[in-house]
Image (cartoon, rainbow, N blue to C red):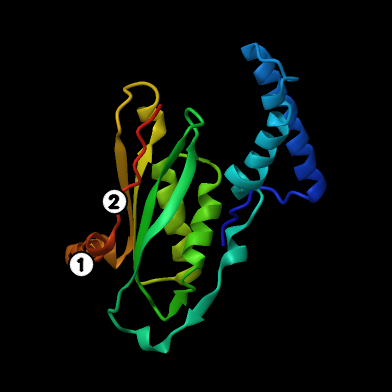
Amino acid sequence: MREYVQERSSKLDIDSKEKTIEKLVEDFLRILGEDLQREGLRETPRRVSRMWIEELAMGYFVDPLAYVKTFEVEEYEGREGLVAVTNIPTKSICEHHLLPFFGYTHIVYVPSGRVLGFSKFARVIKVLSSRLQIQERLTEQIADFLEEVLNPRGLLVLQEALHTCALIRGVEESMTMMTVALRGVFREQKEMVNLALQLVNASKLPLPKFEGF
């Protein structure tokens, strides 16, 4: 199986990275002309560095395999049954402007006898999305990972997201993006894709609203 964490970081390594980011945030605020001693900013560098290491970029230090728990289901072997997991909240940081994009991931797969624990879909996506990303790559990474751990006969990953880099800068429009990754029988059988999309459309939620600044 491919490596999803480039480097195994020790607690000492992570602490060092956190301190380095804290210093960079201090420098950034000084460049903007801010006073680091004023009450509202005294703890900001530390808070920002912890936020990036422990939350926004935790995918660099956590292996999504740690959250994988699969079950063998004999009833699915050799059959055409579909499993759909929809409306999985997905949040990431766009690598182009370091601004968030967020929305939902929808997954439909044809098991070959193995299924993933229901809550694990959200945990795996959380890890893979907690890195600097673009939506197109993230969708493919989710599909690649699930294909490796489940070996499904078919897999469809559909992701839709609102990108704040288009909303609060540039064109300043509420633009959304939809990406799809197909594996197995979904690449070969159009009717299977149509069925999977019907399942997704029957249950998917509207994207969260964000009006910008």
Q: Position of 207 compared to 28: left or right?
A: left
Quadrant (top left, top right, bottom left, bottom right) of the C terminus: top left
- State whether residue 77 appears in this view: no
**Amino acid found under the numbered disc labelled 2:** Pro
Please name the residue shown 39% across and 71% down the image: 152
- Nearer to the camera, 204 or 153: 204
- Nearer to the camera, 164 or 116: 164
Q: Position of 190 compared to 148: left or right?
A: left
- Nearer to the camera, 118 or 133: 118
In the picture, residue 137 is in which quadrant? Answer: top left
- How many numbered circles are shown? 2
In the picture, residue 80 is in which quadrant? Answer: bottom left
Please name the residue shown 61% across and 46% down the image: 55
Image x and y of residue 56, in percent = 58, 43
Above-or-below relation of 131 to 42: below
Residue 206 disc label: 2
Q: Position of 159 compared to 32: left or right?
A: left
Image x and y of residue 126, in percent = 52, 54
Label 1 sits on a secondary structure element that is: helix
Label 2 sits on a secondary structure element that is: loop
Residue hosting label 1:
195
**Amino acid found under the numbered disc labelled 1:** Leu
Q: Position of 171 compared to 145: left or right?
A: left
Image x and y of residue 118, in percent = 46, 71
Spatial CA distance of label 2 from label 1 is 20 Å
Q: Residue furthest front?
A: 39
Please name the residue shown 60% across and 55% down the image: 3
Above-or-below relation of 98 to 50: above
Task: Tell whether label 1 touches label 2 (CB within 8 Å).
Answer: no
Image x and y of residue 207, in percent = 32, 47
- Nearer to the camera, 45 or 178: 45
